[in-house]
Structure formats: structure tokens, C-alpha cells
Amino acid sequence: MILGKVALGFLGAAVVGGAMLCSDGFVTVRVNEHQPKGTHLHLVVPGALAPIGMKFVPREKMNEAERNVRPWLPAIRAAVDQIADYSDTTFVEVTNSSEHIRVSKVGASIVVDVEDPGETVHVSVPWRTIKSVLRELEEAGPSA
Amino acid sequence: MKRANRVLAAFVGVILFSMAGVALAAPPERWLHVKVIDSAGGETVRVNVPLSLAEKILPTINHGNLHNGRVTCGGIELNGLDLRAIFEAVKDTPDNEFVTVQGRDEDVRVAKQAGNFVVHVHQADKSKEKQEVDVIVPMAVVQALISSGTKELDLVAAIRALKEMGDATLVTVHDGTNNVRVWIDARNTSE
């Protein structure tokens, strides 16, 4: 009976933990190098882990990243806050003889696709994750 | 009978409520589109931006001459014409042709036409590639653009004015290898 309650507690914690991890959606990274023995990477990570991962980035690196992105933080924040209101669309698309680059909104994520003769890259980041990352960056700023 | 009346009243209420919802629904989002085709380089660039997004983002950017949604500028020139001075001069005048330059290699026309500020440049210099530039900006947008003073162009005010406009092509540029088009409509994709 006690064992059953403990198991139920574990199960409940696992379900709640899993739900929390998945609440921000998933960051997807796919890299396929078009060459023999090229890299074929397919990574799916819960978006909620990104800000946790940033806690382990060395302080000076975070400060440097914050310095670089600081002028654009308000603009990125405004864009991310607003973007949920729009239907799925492609914001920017560049096509030339060798490359195809696309930045689009798909569901709750910002998706960047790059195709060139050397590789295909697909990155999908939920905007809730972007918001969390921005918050971490802001906290890494000089006022933090 | 009473029950039938109540059902009918509820039915009419639902219909009226739905109609009010349709009437009060937000107007469709307006999108700014830019399409650049460089046939020499074989490159096509498409940009689709919701005007409301631009309206929110521009005031947050403080970089170079852009501050709080306004561009600081002494004068905007197009082929030697100070566009800002012309905007100021023509904003209250009736439709007219203000500048006409007809040269051997270049024609320039600046006019106010059907509520739009129109600039047309045709360049056919033999040493260069033929080039056609058409800029058509609604006067309301022009007025919004110059509303913040003599040294600034208020981009956010112009975007707000653009949001009130119907579908329109604002800029087209054609030369030997490049085609550029800037337009607004309610679609979230380029054609």
C-alpha cells in the first residue's frame, strides 16, 4: 500500500515535471552535411531547458553575449511579444543559385531553414524559449 | 407558446450577437512586402512584415539615425531633389505636377496625383543601364512622415497612416538586372 503511494507520488512528479519541461515546446536543430562522413545531427530539446542550460555558461561569456545583443534586446522582445498574434508566414526568404534561406513562423516557433550545396540546417525555437533566453540575457547585464 | 417565444428570442439574440462580433472584429492585418529580384546574380529576396509588428519594433530601435521610430535627416535626396522640402511644399496644394525634368538621358517627374505623392524617374543613359523608378506614396502617409519636425521623418506615424490605406504598390524599381517592388496588402505572403 505504501509502495503504491510512493509509486503514485513518483509518477505524479514525473508527469508534472514532464509537463513543465514540455510547456515551452521543443527546440529542434537538424544539420545534414552533404558529404561522405558529414555531420548528421538531429537534436530535439525541451525549450524549458535552454534557460537552465544558460545558468552553466561562464559569466564572462554571458556578459559578452549580453553586451553584443543589448542594443537589440528591446526590438527582439517587442517582436517576440507580438509575433504570437500572426498567422504562420515566411518573414524573410532569400533564394539564389546556391542557397535558400527562410525565416518563418510556424505554429508557436520561429523556424530558420538554410539549404546550400554543403549542408541543410533547420532550427526551430519556440518563442517562449526565446523569451526565457532574453530574460536570462537581461539578467546577465551590468545592472543584474 | 411562451417556450417557443423564448427559443425564438434566444435564437435572435445569438444571431445579433454573432453579427455584432463580425462588425466589431478587428480589421485584417496589413502587411508590407518587399520583393527584390536580381536576375544577374540569380537572387530573389522576399520580405513580409506585418505593419503592426513594424509599428511596435521601430520605436525600440536606437541605432544610427533611427531613434524612437524617427529618422533624423538633414534632407532626403533623390537624384538631387530634396524630397522633404518638396513634401512640405506640396502637402496642402491641389493635384499638380511640381517638377518635370526632361533631359537627354533622364526624365524626372514629381507630382501630386489622386491623393498620392508621385515620383517617377526614367534613366536611359547610354553608358548605364536603363532604369525606371516609381514611388507612389499616399499624401496622408507623407504628412505623417513629416509630422515630427523639420529634421526628422516619423516612420511610426507613417506606418500608422499606411495601416489605414488600401492595397497599394509604393515603390517599383526596374533596371537591366534588378526588379524591386514594395507594396502593402492584407495577405501574409508575397505573390
Image (spheres, coloured by chain):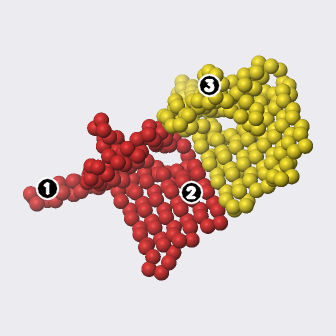
Chain colours: A red, B yellow
Disc number lying in front (2 or 1): 2
| Residue sitting at the far front | B127
Q: Position of residue A63 (x, y in %)?
A: 32, 46
Q: Position of residue B76 (x, y in %)?
A: 68, 33
Residue A5's mark?
1
- Label 3 resides on the chain identified as B
With B57 as the anchor, is B159 left or right in this view? right
Looking at the image, is B102 positioned above or below residue B93? below
Q: Position of residue B87 (x, y in %)?
A: 73, 26
Disc number lying in front (1 or 3): 3
Q: Are the residues tagged 2 and 1 within 8 Å (C-beta)?
A: no
Residue annotated with mark 2: A102
Say what amino acid the circle numbered 1 marks. Answer: Lys
Residue annotated with mark 3: B151
Residue, x 53% and y 62% (percent of image)?
A: A114
Looking at the image, is B143 positioned above or below residue B124? above
Q: Are marks 2 and 1 on the same chain?
A: yes
Residue, x 52% and y 31% (percent of image)?
A: B67
Residue A19 in sight in this render = no
